[in-house]
Image (cartoon, rainbow, N blue to C red):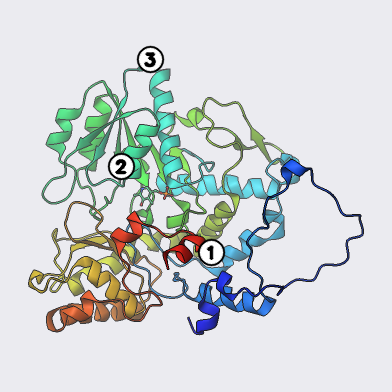
Amino acid sequence: MNNKLYGNLIFELSKPGRKGYSLPACPFGEATLPEHLRRGTDAELPECDELTVVRHYTNLSANNFGVDNGFYPLGSCTMKYNPVIDEETAALKEFAGLHPQQPAATCQGALEVYYNLQRSLAALTGLSEFTLNPYAGAHGELTGLMVIRAYHERNGQTQRVKVIVPDSAHGTNPASAAVCGLEIVEVKSTADGIVDVDDLRGLLDDSIAAMMMTNPNTLGLFERQIPEIAKLVHECGALMYYDGANLNPMLGACRPGDMGFDVMHINLHKTFATPHGGGGPGSGPVGVRKGMEDLLPSPKVVKTDSGYDIVGTDGAINVSRFLGNFAVIVRAYTYILSLGRENVRMVGPLSTLNANYIKESLKDVYLLPIDGLCKHEFVFDGLKDKSTGVTTMDVAKRLLDYGYHAPTIYFPLLFHESLMIEPTESESLDTIDEFIGVMRRIAEEAATDPELVKGAPHSTPIGRVDDVLAAKHPILTYRQLKQDQ
Ligand SMILES: *Cc1c(COP(=O)(O)O)cnc(C)c1O
């Protein structure tokens, strides 16, 4: 915060009688609200002049950190650059001004974008057809599992009520299965971090509905046994579900459809731009292999002789009344078109190269529990030298002092000091080299001046927060803050 005054809470800047607006005289008589609708006391609102309000919020916004401020290597979140052109197309008034209940004849261009993105995703993943209706990755998982349930029900296999999930899976996988009314069976990982096929074999029977997998998995490792896993799962009559939230490493390298997956979701807000985090906005399209298209939820966009139409609002599965988060769809389509067929194929190799370059450049000072080639991300188990007492939390906080967003920490739960780094394909060699330099410098500081790292951050508006206190005694309102003082 540049200026102390404007950095206060807006309530502390309030002076009775100040105001930042001027309204024209009301041309109508004053309305009287019925007694029971009136408030007992006046609302406690801050009273400030306009410039004070502008400076207050502008300064607050400068405390935020985003991909547009600096490197954001948050593993499993794919914080790639969101090009400005994506925002421009999403904001075109012909898109932004649409009403979800507009007749199809009046929004043919928008339906064409929806339809074409469905086709692009099918081509990129090797699946047959997609719906873009789900609003997030987790919503896509739920949709996909509902499709799988409907598939088994159609085949009279109603006893298939269990989903196999690896112990390294993203937390939403078991959560979505539970919400869908399915039971979760966990399959173990081997010592080198991939699915233990022998353990899997013992779990397969006719109560299994599906196997949910992320590949590369949450450790950034490619599941080398995927053809064998798909064969075993299919032989037992179950389906393969692919969590494609972070599809980066796949683009241009391989396709889930070719690996034997039957159903999948993609997070458009991770793989195909759209700024995300803090709860939105998102889009989790779901794709299915040939023969399962009719199980996808409605409404659907179809191509007709004269253009495009919206059909079937009474499908068996309905996860959204309308056609999804359209602005995210426009951004994703723009991202794909602006890269073009050739460059989209570079996303996988480049994000993989960037991650491996960082891993190899740091593994002499940070502990790499599972060595070998990673895909778009990898996990360190804290600093290599454990004698300093400097933890992953300390390293993450110290990174803030150097102007970086911290990587994902303490996830996955397979290691005590997980530090999960995902650079994405967006970053230049210069940025990555500088980050490596800073990570090495922090390792050096940990060795020579551990208290400096343990006390970090030193340069942020708020220093080290007390996580336990913040969780157990959160101060959520101004009134509470006042009482506590
Ligand atoms: C982010 C993520 C999800 C969940 O996506 P949301 O849009 O946050 O619901 C699921 N699986 C993986 C692997 C993810 O990284």
Disc 3/disc 2 C-alpha distance (Å): 26 Å
Choose the circle earlier in sequence order: 3 or 2: 3
Disc 1/disc 2 C-alpha distance (Å): 28 Å
Q: Which mark is residue 156?
A: 3
Tell me if label 1 and label 3 are in contact, CB under 8 Å. Answer: no
* Residue 166 versus residue 349 in the image, above or below: above
Q: Residue at x 55, y 55 (%)?
A: 333
Of the two numbered discs 1 and 2 on the same chain, state the one appearing first in sequence: 2
Q: Quadrant of the C terminus?
A: bottom left
Vertical comparison of 217 with 205: above or below: below
The residue indicated by pointer 1 is 338
* Nearest to N terminus: mark 1 or mark 3: 3
Residue flagged by tag 1: what amino acid is it?
A: Ser
Crowding at dot 2, Cα within 10 Å, few <14 / some 14-19 / many 20+, comes out as some
The part of the image, by quadrant, that contains residue 181 is top left
Image side of residue 302 versus residue 450, left or right: right
Label 3 Cα crowd, 10 Å radius (few <14 / some 14-19 / many 20+):
few
- Badge 3 marks a residue whose secondary structure is loop
Up-down: is 19 above or below 282?
below
Which residue is labeled 2 in the image? 259
Left or right side of 216 for 336: right
Residue plotted at (18% across, 61% down) = 417
| Crowd around label 1: few <14 · some 14–19 · many ≥20 (10 Å) | some
Rendering coords of residue 229 (x, y %): 22, 37
Q: CA distance from mark 1 to mark 3?
A: 46 Å
**Residue at far left of view:** 387
Kindly give the residue lying farthest to the top in the view shown.
156
